[in-house]
Image (tube, rainbow, N blue to C red):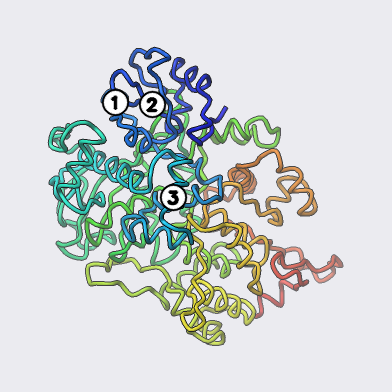
Amino acid sequence: MIPSLHPSTLDFEACYRAASGRDARWDGRVYLAVTSTGIYCRPSCPARKPRRENCRFFPSAAACVAAGFRACKRCRPEAVPGTRDWDIRNDLAARAVRRIRDGAIDLGGVAGLARELAVSERHLRRTLIEEVGASPLQLARTRRAHAARALIEETELPLADIAFAAGFGSIRQFGDTMREEFGVAPSALQRRPDGAAGSGSQGSGSAELDPATDTSSPYAPASDERPRLALRLRTRAPFSGAGVRAFLAAHAIPGRDLIEADGASSHALDVPGGTAVVRIDWNEVPPPTEQLASGASVVGIPITLTLPSLADTMPAIQRIRRLLDLDADPAQVSDALGDDPRLQPIMLRKPGLRLPGARNSVEFALGTVLGQQVSLAAARTIQGRLAAHFETPPPSPAGIAPGFRGAPDAVLVAATPAEELRERLGLTRARAATLQALAAALAGSEAVAKPPLDLGPGADRDRARAELLAIRGIGPWTVELIAMRALGDPDAFPAGDLILRRALGVENDRQAHTLAQSWRPYRGYATQYLWSDFLESLGGLGRPQERKHHEPRTTQLYRDRRCRAPLPRDLDTGRRCDPRRRLRD
């Protein structure tokens, strides 16, 4: 049973039973605060359980701190990976929590977040206190404190650098917040003297973790001013590293991603200071079977970050967590989908499969349009051209990452005539027109006071879906794919997808929706499992270059001129189209 997130509706009996049984499935969703000691714990804390009258339960760590409790030093509740419970909802509180998680308070303060959500600061504060138990500032302070503690433990950075890397505005604010959260000064927190978990430097580091000694390395820093951090990002076990790597390899964009022969992969990340690069060492991630056999509840994903500046640390980490879906809870997904006869065999064979998100919502939306009706290999090539011709200019020389490009700039794409887009990217006229229209919507217009179309995790999903559908050439399949990856909706469901229909054995969208009703609110994860299983059955999962895009690909059916079957309909336009003509265009 998943607890309610509303502090006033938390079931005390259910929460107390979970804490008494040390049920780790509730970690990160409910926090136990003990009035006799003034500390708060995760439900699975190994300490002796307190008396019932001394227990209080909160839906967030920030709510515990706001009520005057500090973190337990034994169970370390701040070390629990994040949760996707707030991704399920689309109300004001959920959107605000997602934006605060992405660092909106650090960039524009509470006033900026309120303007973005089109509400007053007072209403925003009242809503979050009622729903989450903490104000926007308290949520932001707790987020910074937890990030700072992870950096203290896993890097050798000076405390002053850690303060600014975590998003604090001053050293004094850093010290006060850490005392409030953990009951001790930052200097009293334990550090690893050997730097075993990672290192931090201004352009230099250990020989083992710092590949910058080889200037030919594509992820080497541009100069001594680009910091490098080696960390382990926590996620709930099991985590299918091979499955996520296969997905990233299948969708790798030239100039934006690098899949290395030794098993590692490097990816460009767009942060306020320019382009950061993350290198993920997949060989150090144990297979899900070993994770389950060891009984570990959390697994660390080893990464090496090369940043334009330390101030970009938190934005980069949050983009990595979204890209790899590190806040997912496999047990929660299994409880929701594991009893389905279609999904159960797949989930038993592939425990810990994730639903990767988009590192940049604009890039993904434009790339999805470019990938309509073509293979994955062709889509990657066209997306590489888009990044090469319309790269977002870096704000400073430190924002340049050698060997990698920034994301496409929607403003530059919108300002380019459709005919020029067609010639430079190799598109059909209709696809070029759709690309330009989408870019114009994403860029917005100051002349007519039209705000940009927001496709980020904190966007209003209903409004975003409606605005996308209003663009000619974009239909339900494209909208749901953007909702799944860019908007971060775990319930997005592209019912018109050809592979999905084949896996379900249905003939139309209505039948697919009917079958998927029991999977809510995790239809996106069910789709990912079905896609993965179907593609593996074709022998393509281990050969990403041969995997096909999920848009219907029917060319092979029409190579025989004697075929009398009716022409297929484009899922987004509804018009019948001849694949041979599309290839000639």
Q: Is the residue under label 2 in contact with that under label 3 (CB below 8 Å)?
A: no
Amino acid type indicated by mark 2: Arg
* Residue 465 in the figure: left or right of residue 60: right
Cα separation between marks 3 and 2: 23 Å
Of the image marks 3 and 1, the number of the one nearer the N terminus: 1
Q: Which mark is residue 440?
A: none
Q: Residues within 10 Å of mark 1 (few under 14, many from 20)?
A: many
Of badges 3 and 2, nearer the viewer stands 2
Give the residue type at disc 3. Arg
Between marks 3 and 1 in the image, the one whose residue lies nearer the viewer: 1
Q: Which residue is mark 2?
A: 42
Looking at this view, is 301 or 375 the one in front?
301
Q: Which residue is mark 3?
A: 322
**Dot 3: element:** helix
Quarter of the image where one finds residue 431: bottom right
At 23% across and 60% down in the image, what residue appears? 220
Identify residue for label 1.
72
Q: Position of residue 275 (x, y in %)?
A: 31, 64
Image check: 261 left or right of 483? left
- Does residue 366 lie above or below 30 as drawn? below
Residue 332 position within the rendered picture, expressed as x and y whole percent measured from the top left: 54, 33
> Given the current orientation, which residue lies at the most extreme front position?
122
Q: Is any part of residue 323 visible from this angle?
A: no
Quick one: 43 or 220, which is closer to the camera? 43
Circle 3 packing at 10 Å, graded few (<14), some (14-19), many (20+), is many
Q: Nearer the viewer, residue 399 or 314?
A: 314
Residue 300 in the image: state x and y as whole percent.
35, 37
Image quarter in which the N terminus is found: top right
Which sits in the foreground, 253 or 365? 365
Q: Secondary structure at mark 1?
A: loop
User: How far is the residue under mark 3 from the one under mark 1?
Assistant: 27 Å
